[in-house]
Amino acid sequence: MASFALPRSSELSLRHCPLQASSHALSVCGDELYTLKYDVSLPPRRVSVRAAPRMGNINEGKGIFAPLVVVARNVIGKKRFNQLRGKAIALHSQVITEFCRSVGADAKQRQGLIRLAKKNGEKLGFLA
């Protein structure tokens, strides 16, 4: 007969179930039926409390051009400001694309340069 180590007594329970089938491991002794139930409860999950993810510029309000950008946005209005900024970003992307064509850079390098321009714009405060 094979031997095995039983878990601690608080984790093991033996229940008498006269002639009743169960989904647990069964042991039959004569006409009586016993079920062996092993409690496999998991430890409580740790739930980390994190700050809600923030969309936008992490350097908002910082950078050498940020005060100028904020004043311009307040003077001309947010809607018009965003239109002008979108046009400026599109124009800059076109300039980067033309530069990549002239030096023979592939699309992946072009995409990297556009991301670098965005990152630098955030640091300088253009996207404040």
Image: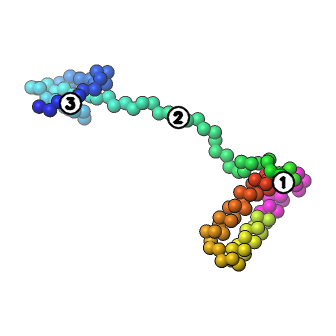
Q: Residue 20 appears at what percent x and percent y?
A: 19, 29
Amino acid bearing label 2: Val
Is any part of residue 82 visible from this angle?
Answer: yes
- Circle 1 residue: 65
Numbered mark located on residue 4 in the image: 3
User: Which image quadrant for residue 18?
Assistant: top left
**Residue type at the position of mark 1:** Phe
Q: Which residues are magenta?
A: 69-86
The answer to whether 48 appears left or right of 119 in the picture is left
**Is any part of residue 19 visible from this angle?**
no
Characterize the local packing of mark 1: few (<14), some (14-19) or many (20 or more) Cα atoms within 10 angstroms. some
- Local secondary structure at mark 3: loop
67 is higher (above) or lower (below) than 104: above
Q: Quadrant of residue 29?
A: top left
Q: Tell me the colour scheme of the image.
A: rainbow
Inspect the magenta stretch and tell me whether residue 74 lies in it. Answer: yes
- Residue at mark 2: 47
